[in-house]
Image (cartoon, rainbow, N blue to C red):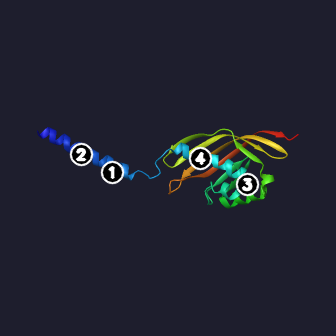
Amino acid sequence: MQHKKNNTASATLLSVVLASLVQLSPAWAGDSEAEVKTVIAGLESTWNDADMDGYLAAYRRDASMSLTYGNSVVQGWDALNTLFRTSYPDEARMGKFTIDSIAVTIMGDDAAVAYGNFTHVFTEETIIGGYTHVLTREADGSWIIQHERTSRGKVIAAE
C-alpha cells in the first residue's frame, strides 16, 4: 500500500508542477511563425496603401534598430524614418511592392529571422531582390523588426 500512496503523491505533485508551468507560460505562446509572417506581409500592404506610418510601425522605435542595404547602414528608428520619408515622399515615388516569398526561422522564444524575395516596381525601374529581417518579441508578445538587410538582385529599366 505504501508504494501505491507514493505513486499517487508523485502523480499529484507532477500535475501541480505541470499546471504551474502552463500558467507561467507567456500569454502570447502561439504560432510564432505565423505571427512573424503576418508582420512581414503587413509591410507589403501598408507600403502599397502609401501608409508610411503603418509601414514604419513594424520597426523597433529606438536607436538599436538598423537597416543595411547595399553598402549603407542606417542606425536607429529616427534615421530610418528620415530616410524613408525623404526617399519616398508620396505614393507615386513609393511604387508598388510585392513580397514574393517569406520563410521564417524561429531562433528562440523572443527572436526570429524572416527572409525571402521581393519585387518593387517604380516608374523608372523594377527591382527584384532579397531581404532578411531579424525580429524580436516585445513585452506584450508582438513581434517587431530589429534589423533589416535588403539587396538588389536584379534591376530592370522601365521601357
> Looking at the rendered structure, which numbered label has been put on residue 38?
4
Please name the residue that numbered disc 1 is placed on.
20
Q: Position of residue 136 (x, y in %)?
A: 55, 51
Q: Amino acid at mark 2?
A: Thr
Q: CA distance from mark 3 to mark 2?
A: 57 Å
Q: Amino acid at mark 4?
A: Thr
Question: Is the residue 55 above or below the residue 14 in the image?
Answer: below
Residue 61 vs residue 27: left or right?
right
Please tell me whether mark 3 sits on a helix, a strand or a loop: loop
- Which one is nearer the viewer's eye here, 88 or 42? 42
Q: CA distance from mark 4 to mark 1?
A: 31 Å
Q: Earlier in the sequence, mark 4 or mark 2?
A: 2
- Which one is nearer the viewer's eye here, 51 or 89? 51
- Which one is nearer the viewer's eye here, 132 or 142? 142
Please tell me whether mark 2 sits on a helix, a strand or a loop: helix
Q: Amino acid at mark 1?
A: Ser
Q: Amino acid at mark 3?
A: Ala
Please name the residue that numbered disc 3 is placed on.
50
Residue 121 vs residue 106: left or right?
right
At 15% from the left and 39% from the top, the residue drawn is 4
Q: Position of residue 12 (x, y in %)?
A: 24, 45
Question: Is the residue 1 above or below the residue 137 in the image?
Answer: above
Please name the residue that numbered disc 2 is placed on.
12
Q: Nearer the viewer, mark 4 or mark 2?
A: 4
Q: Earlier in the sequence, mark 2 or mark 1?
A: 2
Q: CA distance from mark 1 to mark 3?
A: 46 Å
Location of the N terminus (image quadrant): top left
Query: Dot 1, how many residues are within 10 Å of its Cα: few (below 14), some (14-19), or many (20+)?
Result: few
